[in-house]
Image (tube, rainbow, N blue to C red):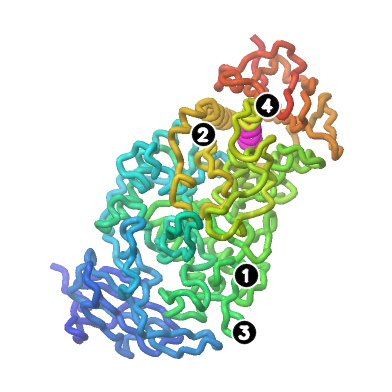
Amino acid sequence: MSPERIDAYPTRAIAGYGVRAGNPLPFGATAVPGGINFSVYSDRATRMWLVLFRPGEAEPAAELEFPAEFRIGSVFAMTVFGLDPETVEYGFRADGPFDPAHGDRFDPSRVLTDPYARTIAGRDVWGAEPDRDRLCPYRSRLVPDDFDWGDDAPPGIPTEDLVVYELHVRGFTCHPSSGVSAPGTYAGLREKIPYLRELGVNCVELMPVFEFDEHDNPRTDPVTGEPLLDYWGYNTVGFFAPKAGYAATGRFGMQADEFKSLVKDLHTAGIEVVLDVVFNHTAEGNEQGPTLSFRGLDNATYYMLTPDGDYYNFSGTGNTVNCNHPVVRDFVLNCLRHWVAQYHVDGFRFDLAAILDRAPDGTPLANPPLLEQLAHDPVLRHCKLIAEAWDAAGLYEVGSFPSYGRFAEWNGKYRDAVRRFLKGDPATVGELATRIVGSPDLYTGRGTAASVNFVTAHDGFTLHDLVTYNDKHNEANGEAGRDGANDNHSWNCGAEGPTDDPEILRLRTRQMKNALALLLTSHGVPMLLAGDEMARTQRGNNNTYCQDNELSWLDWSLLDANAGLHRFVRSLIAFRHAHPVLRSAAHPTCGVSWHGVRAGEPDWSAGCRLLAVTFAQGDERIHLAANAHWEAHELELPAPAPGTSWHLVADTSAEPPHDINPPTAETTLAVPDRYRIGPRSTVILLARPTT
């Protein structure tokens, strides 16, 4: 019989609860024998209270002040006995100086959310009108560690073999046409896993799933006057907590299990999970914003402050997280470890990641300690780490982000080069050539997998809108069209917005296929925006952060309406998976030859709008020709390997089903050494044994 634990008994009583001095680590609330250990950091607080709530009750059940002797350094730690970890809700009150000029903004009237809260109660059902007078609107909760992961293991797909699919959890299945039993939820997304497998993607990049408040948007619809929501979710409230409003079971507090079930099923399908994470700012905004957590616990530690105590705003949202402060570094690291260990996620995409290498005064650091720590952390060792290598204050680090050999980057230069080439801008062929071989000018020594190639993403036009609108149409966002990027490099193909002109419609479809053909044959990691494979539209809105409606939701009826485009994308993805020559991890130093109208004679002049390239690796040969010119050209083809001849994989100028041939069904050319490429078209050829 084992001896009884001494630490399983209280040493005193506070507010009717038995307590004892707690353990300072880990931070947050942790179930221990007989009770719960609470630990919270604050360097400048003079007093701290634990505030306990019963579910559904407005007023606290009890408030327990941490005795002075329960403070260890800058950590208040206390074990409280007799609490049920599955039902207790809690927050903290912190007292200290209110001296904004010196960085302190303590307010003991506020009940604060635990930065380490494992789940959060208060926004359990998406869109439910909140009680804005509620004491502690975001109440912290624990999560039982009892989920059955079975034999789940990370798929471990090499980065260069990924085909990433960026999606919004709610928007992916919220439309009535989705046909799922729980629209707009993790459970709804689980029901669409067979679709993802059939499409061929092997990695989903989920837009923010950390807890946020969808009602955190002061604007209204300019037509209806209805409140607009924070649909995208980039204003984080709880960094360790999955968004309850995305769970069909959120009202029962089961969002953690529902999200884990999603990850487990995606892994079973061979699909990795990357989370879009936001460590550059929080939902507290500037000095006019609410005091929810960090500001009330230790404002001067968690935020970058000017010498006068104001908030630096490198994020464009009012505040900037002080990421390279040692305490904040540990917070970020512990958060990511939590999502890897507890939720089995496979990687992270860091929003406005350039902020992560800024010093407390905003100066970019040559060797930022946070990024170095993330790159070499043993728990994160095999995670995909992807940086959006810029911020809202103009720091642009695409190709120069401090990667430590671990970080890939959203390659914004790839996006712009492909867009400009396709719309027919002059002097674009040279840069396009550099981008489709993995941008060696940016990522020398880092390999092609450092470049996450994309033409569209959540932030901007959809692919359909890229070829349908010259200008953004963001009036519905309530900002008089001021929001959203203006430099979209888009072209409407002859008419702004919807049209019934058959020639324009055919050209738009061809341009979408051209973009997809380039993306899925380029070296690097391709990323698709969900719905582009079926021509989803946002009606010209390139910043739908506040549009929780059919403007943002994926209309699944488009799958039938644009079946030809969907088939084209599915076949292209299968082609990429079938041919390692397109997925080389190293930048090609040989095995790449460039061509123009004549084989071996590329035209790099400003007036040229045609580029052809042959990729060779071992016995494999793939020939890609892209023509952005408004005229057709007769191409002389390079000689394939002996014993092989060129076969047609895809020609975007052809009508379905002749626009693409599935793997192993490529057709022989009528003339083996020449091919006529149509206006504004892309052709893909494969060398196969001559029969």
What's the amino acid at mark 2?
Met
How many angstroms separate mark 3 from mark 2 (CA)? 51 Å
Secondary element type, mark 4: strand
Side of 139 where 376 appears, left or right: right
| Vertical order, 632 against 402 (above or below) | above
Residue 283 visible to the viewer: yes
How many angstroms separate mark 2 from mark 1 (CA)? 40 Å
Q: Main secondary structure of the magenta part?
A: helix
Q: How many marks?
A: 4
Secondary element type, mark 1: loop
Q: Which residue is drawn at 70% across and 39% down?
A: 436
Task: Find disc 2 in the rendering and name its residue.
Answer: 534
Q: What's drawn in magenta, residue-wise?
A: 511-520
Outermost residue on the top side: it is 691
Mark 4 or mark 2: which is in front?
2
Whether residue 445 is in magenta: the answer is: no
Task: Find disc 3 in the rendering and name its residue.
Answer: 307
Rendered-image quadrant of the C terminus: top right
First in sequence: mark 4 vs mark 1: 1
What's the amino acid at mark 4?
Ile
Mark 3 or mark 4: which is in front?
3
Task: Find disc 4 in the rendering and name its residue.
Answer: 622
Task: Find disc 1 in the rendering and name its residue.
Answer: 358
